[in-house]
Image (tube, rainbow, N blue to C red):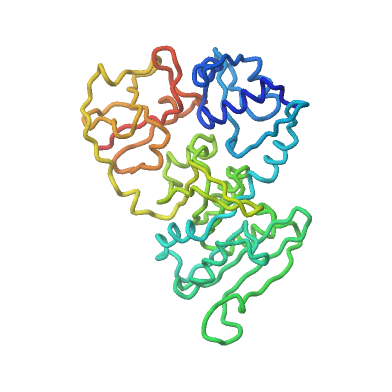
Amino acid sequence: MALTEKGKNAFLQIKKFFPKGQFTAKELSDACGEKIVAATLNGVVNNGYLIKIENTSPIVYEAIENIDSIIIEDNKKGCDNSNLHLAKKTKNDEFYTRYEDIEIEVMKYRKYFRDKVIYLPCDDPAEKKSEFWSFFINNFDAFGLKKLIATHYDEFGKAYKIWIENDLNGDGYIDDDDVLQEDLEGNGDFRSPECIDILKESDIVITNPPFSLFREFVHTIISNNKKFLIIGNQNAFTYKEIFPLLKDNIIWTGYNMVKKFYQPDGSIKEFGNVCWFTNLHTVKRDEEMILVKEYNPNTYLKYDDFDIINVDRLKDIPKDYNGLMGVPITFLDNYNPNQFKIIWLDGPDSNKWYGRGPALNGKNKYRRVIIQKVK
């Protein structure tokens, strides 16, 4: 089913004003300056580009992941969504990480690599498309790696495993001349038995996994008790499968944002909310936020249904308030577990998944992390 002209317009306005976070038809209308009704948004939902939050009044919507990377084409016959399906199927998952972005982040963890087996499960070194492989080959000796392994996924079954661990040609250093390669029996899916066997052999997993499979990828490496450093969208902060891991200090964010990726055609795609996730210790997690604001009940209003004050900006977290506070989800990129404890997302009950931000004066805020000072 194709988007109507009104649906296409609504889709473009959502991309512009609400690429992440939740909103109502009225909030979208107010943001873009034209009336967009719920019926139009429901049409966008039916096409698969918008999520409708159940049991809300008024109806609350949320954009799908990576909506900012989906392109719809305009033509006289209306809006054909075949390009959207193609984007969701391939383009959203095919972003190649730049060497400089790998280097600036990975060098922070170099002390963890000595005598370790590094596994790159979403790469294509044989076709020279993997900057992860290039980076670790270039630094194999400097890092003191035990072994470097990569596997390549191919839906048509032309998958392979490539690895390096010894100076095979005896020239005194490790490089691409020392590489071994063999075909995989399956398609190289990271969930396949043969890739799980490679995962079990490894110590640290480092890659840019498909955004659409981020939940499953994290579950796979966590359930196999592996250390990792991976790239993901900050939208994952609010996933049911990911937020509890952040809350319980099982995973956290790395040092840098990743703002640019190469696309298959060689062009650059820019993002504003992609970061590194890891379970390797970072010095960043030991840094405390400097708090300077003082609590004032007239400034820090409480949510309609909870005894929790609202804080719209991280720099406005009061230094002298010991109760519960609702802060933007970007707090998770600055979280020091020695300074704050995380209660839950959007409300104080960890047995309930709220699915929307708490209400303040009858209007739902964007998603909020509920926190409390430790000291």
The one nearer the camera, 97 or 116, is: 97
Q: Can I make out residue 299 in this image?
A: yes
Residue 266 location in percent, x, y? 62, 54
Residue 126 is situated, as x and y percent measured from the top left of the image, at 67, 67
* Quadrant of the image occupied by residue 105: bottom left
Give me the residue at 28% from left, 26% from top. Answer: 323
Q: Position of residue 133 (x, y in %)?
A: 57, 65
- Is 108 rendered above or below residue 68? below
Q: Nearer the viewer, residue 38 or 294?
A: 38
Identify the residue at horizontal 60%, vertical 28% (top origin).
Answer: 12
Q: How many labels does the image show?
A: 0
Quadrant for the C terminus in the image:
top left
Task: Give the farthest residue toward the front.
Answer: 76
- The residue at 60%/39% (across/down) is 69
Q: Quadrant of residue 240?
A: top right
Position of residue 358 in the picture relative to residue 187 (left or right) = left
Q: In which quarter of the image is residue 148?
A: bottom right
Quarter of the image that includes the N terminus: top right
Q: Can residue 1 be seen in this view?
A: no
Question: Which residue is at the front of the view, 185 or 102?
Answer: 102
Asked if residue 181 is positioned above or below residue 225 in the image, the reply reads below
Horizontal and vertical percent position of residue 108: 40, 60
